[in-house]
């Protein structure tokens, strides 16, 4: 068992929050970078891609409003933990999407 006193615990928390937020922003931007590859791979049209981006953007906007209210009610620790868990599960579910409608619905989840 490690016996050490963790100094500057708040900086560890700041680092973890910074890391989670950075991953979140990278995750949101990656679909734009992968657009040409995804269009070729799945034979998507511009309209198909626009529907996917719209679903993700709408879900993100609603999520910001909803989770802001939830975090105010339950607190930062629990709220951020629940948010990370939900975001992770949604990300994993995208891997099982078989078709465009599945991906759009998962983007709204």
Image (cartoon, rainbow, N blue to C red):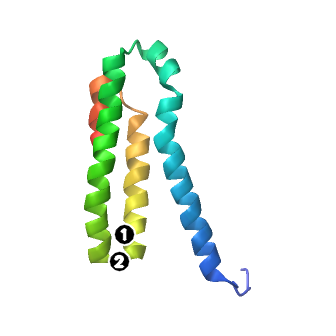
Q: In this view, does 59 lie above or below 81?
A: above
The residue at the point 60 percent across, 80 percent down is: 10
Mark 1 is surrounded, within 10 Å at the Cα level, by few (under 14), some (14 to 19) or many (20 or more) other residues, namely some
Q: Nearer the viewer, residue 44 or 87?
A: 44
Q: Is residue 31 above or below residue 99?
A: below
Q: Judge by depth and name the residue closer to the eye, 7 or 92.
A: 7
Which mark identifies residue 39? none
**Could you tell me which secondary element the residue under label 2 belongs to?**
loop
x and y percentages locating residue 34 in the rendered image = 52, 27
Number of numbered discs overlaid on the protein picture: 2
- The relative height of residue 18 versus residue 6 in the rendered view (above or below) is above
Residue 99 in sight from this viewpoint: no
Residue at image point 27% right, 41% down: 108
User: Between marks 1 and 2, how big is the CA–CA gap?
Assistant: 6 Å
Q: Identify the residue at horizontal 47%, vertical 21% (top origin).
A: 38
Q: Return the mark for residue 79.
A: 1
The disc placed on residue 75 is: 2
Look at the numbered discs 1 and 2 and tell me whether their residues touch, using CB distance below 8 Å: yes
Residue 86 is drawn in which quadrant?
Answer: bottom left
Q: Quadrant of the C terminus?
A: top left
* Location of residue 27 in the rendering, given as x and y in whole percent from the top left corner: 50, 43
Position in image of residue 105 (x %, y %): 26, 35
Q: In which quarter of the image is the N terminus?
A: bottom right
Q: In this view, does 59 lie to the left or right of 11?
A: left
Tell me if I can see residue 88 in this picture: yes
Residue 8 vs residue 96, the one in the foreground: 8
Q: In this view, does 109 lie to the left or right of 21?
A: left
9 left or right, relative to 86: right
Q: x, y percentage for residue 23?
A: 54, 51
Location of residue 16 by image quarter = bottom right
Please name whichever residue, 38 or 99, is drawn nearer the observer in this view of the structure.
Answer: 38
Q: Quadrant of residue 46?
A: top left
């Amino acid at each position: 068992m490690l016996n050490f006193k963790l100094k500057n615990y708040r900086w560890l928390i700041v680092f973890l929050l910074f890391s989670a937020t950075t991953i979140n922003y990278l995750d949101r931007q990656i679909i734009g970078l992968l657009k040409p590859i995804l269009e070729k791979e799945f034979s998507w049209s511009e309209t198909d891609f626009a529907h996917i981006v719209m679903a993700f953007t709408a879900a993100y906007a609603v999520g910001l409003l909803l989770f802001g209210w939830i975090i105010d009610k339950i607190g930062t620790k629990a709220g951020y933990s629940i948010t990370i868990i939900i975001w992770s599960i949604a990300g994993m579910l995208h891997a099982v999407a078989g078709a465009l409608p599945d991906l759009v619905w998962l983007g709204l989840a």
